[in-house]
Image: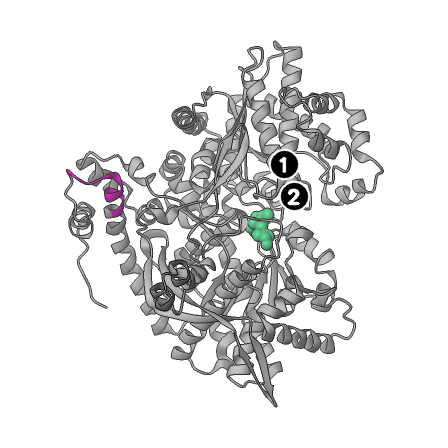
Amino acid sequence: MIQMKTPPLRDAILRHLTYSFGKDPEHAILEDWRMALSYAVRDRIVDAWFKATERTYDTGAKRVYYLSMEFLIGRLLEDGIVNLELVDEAKAALAEFSKDYNEVLTDEPDAALGNGGLGRLAACFLESLSTIGCPAHGYGIRYEHGLFRQSFVDGRQIEQPELWLGQRHAWEFERPEVRYRIGFGGHVDTRGETVRWYPSEEVEAEAFDTPVVGWKGRWANTLRLWSGRAIHPFDLDAFNHGDYAKAAAPEALARTISRVLYPDDTTEQGKELRLKQEYFLTGAALRDILRRFNNQFGDLRRLPEKVAIQLNDTHPAIAGPELIRILHDERGIPFDESMEIARNTLSYTNHTLLPEALESWGEALFGRLLPRHIQIIDQIDFTHAQKNPTRTQSMRSDHQVKMGQLSFVMAHHVNGVSALHTELMKTTVFEELHHLHPDRIVNETNGVTPRRWLLACNPRLAGLITEGIGEGWVDDLEQLEKLEPYIEDAGWLERYARVKRANKVELSNWMGQAHGIHVDPDMLFDVQIKRMHEYKRQHLNILEAIAHWQEIRENPDAGWTPRLKLFAGKAAPGYFFAKDIIRLINDAAVVINNDPVTNKYLKIAFLPNYNVSLAERLVPAADLSEQISTAGKEASGTGNMKFALNGAPTVGTLDGANVEIREHVGAENFFLFGMTAEEVMERRTVESHAQKAIEADPRLASALNAIRDGRFSPSEPTRYHNVVGNLEGADYFLVCSDFTDYWRAQREVDTAFADPQGWARMAAFNTARSGWFSSDRTIRGYMADIWKAKSLLDR
Ligand SMILES: CCc1ccc([C@H](C)CC(=O)N[C@@H]2O[C@H](CO)[C@@H](O)[C@H](O)[C@H]2O)cc1
C-alpha cells in the first residue's frame, strides 16, 4: 500500500480548498470550508480504511454484514474529527482563517436515512464495529430523500421533503464499477430439477461507499448504500418523437426505488414499493457478499465459517429465500443443504412486539413481485414443519407471508434488544418457535456509542471525566465507575453541576436565537425526545403538565420547582392521533407559557424537526429523562441510555432497558413509577379501567376536562374530543391508570431537584454507572454469542 506523509491539517484544508474546490480563502463560502475540512479529515480516514481492508484480506478473517433499511447517521464531520482526535488542530486551523469551528460543523446536513431507534442503533453499531476492529460492512439504501423535515403551522406538524443531497456530500465514494441487476415480477420456469426465474422488470443497484472510522482512527469499515439506476436510462426514440417525459421515464422509474425513506416506524403499510426496496437492498447486498466470498474462499459450503449476516428486524428478511435461490437455483446445491448453509449464515434481531409493526405481506403482491421466492418460502415452511411435526403456526397463513416467522426459522440465532423484551419475545410473538428451538433466542441489550453521545456532544463533561480518570473510558466505558470516589468530593460535584448548567445556558441561548424560545437555564429541564407514538405516551406527559399548571394556578406560592417541559419528535404522516398529540402540546404551550401566574414555574416547548443533531444539543443539557412508555411496549429505548450517561436521571416505567438502567445506576438514582408489564396485562382485563382511574384522581379528571372543554383550543373547542374520548374510553396504553403514580414521581423529582447537591449526586451516579450501555459492549456480545467474529485490533 502506498505510504504518503500526512500533512498538517491546516495545509490539507488549504490544499483541498484550492485544488478540490477551486477557491482561495477570500472567496470561499462556508460550505467550501466545510468541504475542505471534510476532505482533509477524510484523507486520514481513507488511510485507516485501506489498512483495515488489506488486513482483513491478509488474515482471511470472518466478516460481519449488517443489513438494514435504515442508518440514521446524522452528521459525519465532527465524528471524524473526534475519532481522529483532531478537535484542537481543526479549531486552530479554522481560527487562522477566522472561521468558527461550530459554524462550519453545523453547515453539514444530517444524513437522516432512518426513522428512529432501529436506524440510529445501526449507526452506533457500525462505529463500534470499527472501534473494536471487527471486519464489517453495513448495507443499506442511499435514499435521495431521508426522513421528512418537520415544521409547525398553527401547532400542526407539516412534512416537507428532506434534501440532504441538495448540498455537496463529502463522505461518499461512488462505485460505478459495482452494479448489480435486481429483478422483479415475471415468471418461474421449472424443468425437472432446474428452476429458473425470469423477472419481467430489472433495475440496477449502484454502490456508494462511506468509510466508518473508529476511535483513534485505528480501523475503518465500509457502509455501502445502494442507489437505483436504469439499465437503459434514456429512451432516445421517444425523445426523437418529442415525448420527453417518456424519454426520461426509465431513469425516473429506476430512481424511484431509492428515492425516499418510508417514514413509518411502527406500522407496516404493505406498500409494493416498500417490498421492492427491501428486495433491492437484500438482493444487491447478497450478490456483493457472495462475489467477495467467492474471490477469497470459493467453496460456498464454508459460507457460515467466513460470513455472518445480521438482519436488522424483518425488513431484509427476504435474505433467507434469496440466499437459498442463489445456492440452489443458480449454484445447484440441494435445497435442504442450501437452507442449512443459509440458516447458519443468517441471524435476526427483533426490535418490536407491536402487532402492527410485524411485517406480513399479502401473498398476491408477494407472489407477483417475487414469484420464485414465495415458492421457496413454502418449501422452507414445509421442510421446517417436517422436522417439527408439532408445529401449528406457519409463515404462510390467512393469505399473508409472515416475515417474523420466516426470519426466525431462517436464522441460527434470534435476539431481542433488552432483557425484558427478549423474555417477552419468548412468551408472546415467538412462543411456539421458542418452544421448538429453545436455544435460538438470546438477548443483546442495546447500547450507544460514547464517542458521539458523550465525548463529542458533551465536551465539558468529557473533559471533567478525562481529567479525573484519564481517557481510557472512551473505548472502555465501564471505566466510568472510577468516578464514584469523586462523587463524594463536594468540590468535584460542584464542578459536575457547573458543567450541566453551562450546557443548559448554551441550549437556552440556542433556543432563543434559533426559535425565539426564551427560558431560564435554572429551571429543571425535563426532556422527552423520541418518535411520537401512543405507547411512548407523550400524552401522559402533557396531561401531567396541564394538571401541574392547574395546581400552580390554585396555589402559586406553594414553592414550586421551576420546570421546563421540552418535547421533540416526528409523527408518521398518516398517524393522525400522534399528530393530534403534537398539536395539543403546542396549543397547551401557548396558554401555559403566557400565563403570568404560572410561567415562571412551568414552561412548555416543542422543538421542530427532531433529528440526530438536535438530540446532540438536547441530551447534554437535560436534567430529567422521560422514559414513560406502557410497560412491555418499548423494546429497549436508546435515548434513555444517552440521558443517563450525560447525567440526566430517569423518570420511567419498568419497560425495555429502563429495567437494566435502574439496576446499574441504583434504584435510589431512578424515579420509578407505574405498572409492570404483568400488571399492565392484568389492568387491561379490568372493565372501564380508565373511568375508574379518572374517578379516583380529581387532578386527572380536571386536566381531561380542560382539554375537552377547549381550554387550549378556544377557536375550536371540540378539537381534542377524539383524544379525550380515547383516554376516557379504551385507553389501550393505560395513560389514566398510570397517571396518579406518575404525578407522585414527578413531585418527588421536584423535591429532589430542589436540593442541588443531592441532585448532582444522583446525576453523577447515573454517569458513573451507565458505562455498560456502550454499544461497544453490545457489539462484543453479538461477536461472541452470535457472529463468532474476532477483532483484528490487538488490545
Ligand atoms: C415496517 C415499518 C417499521 C419500521 C421500523 C420499525 C422499527 C422496528 C421501529 C423501531 O425503531 N424500533 C425501536 O428499535 C430500537 C432499537 O432496538 C429500540 O430501542 C426501541 O425500543 C424500538 O421501538 C418497525 C416497523
> Residue, x 50% and y 51% (percent of image)?
119
Residue farthest right in this picture: 687
Q: Is residue 752 visible?
A: no
Q: Position of residue 596 (x, y in %)?
A: 55, 11
Q: Amino acid at mark 1?
A: Gly
Q: Position of residue 134 (x, y in %)?
A: 42, 62
Q: Is residue 28 magenta?
A: yes
Magenta-drawn segment:
26-35
> Viewed as shown, does residue 279 lie left or right of 706?
left
SS at badge 1:
strand
Q: Is residue 399 visible?
A: yes
Residue under pointer 1: 652
Camera-side residue of 288 and 481: 288
Query: Where 188 sits versus 764, above or below?
Result: below
Q: Which mark is residue 640?
A: none
Question: Label 2 near label 1: C-beta < 8 Å?
Answer: yes
Q: Residues within 10 Å of mark 2 (few under 14, many from 20)?
A: many
> Residue, x 46% and y 25% (percent of image)?
490
Q: Quadrant of the N terminus?
A: bottom left
Query: Where 100 sits versus 443, above or below?
Result: above
Image quadrant of residue 471? Answer: top left
Q: Residues within 10 Å of mark 1 (few under 14, many from 20)?
A: many
Residue under pointer 2: 655
Residue farthest front in this picture: 241
SS at badge 2:
loop
> Residue, x 41% and y 50% (percent of image)?
475
Q: Is residue 316 magenta?
A: no
Q: Position of residue 602 (x, y in %)?
A: 56, 19
Q: Position of residue 229 (x, y in %)?
A: 40, 64
Camera-side residue of 263 and 33: 263
Q: Quadrant of the C terminus?
A: bottom left
Q: Amino acid at mark 2?
A: Asp
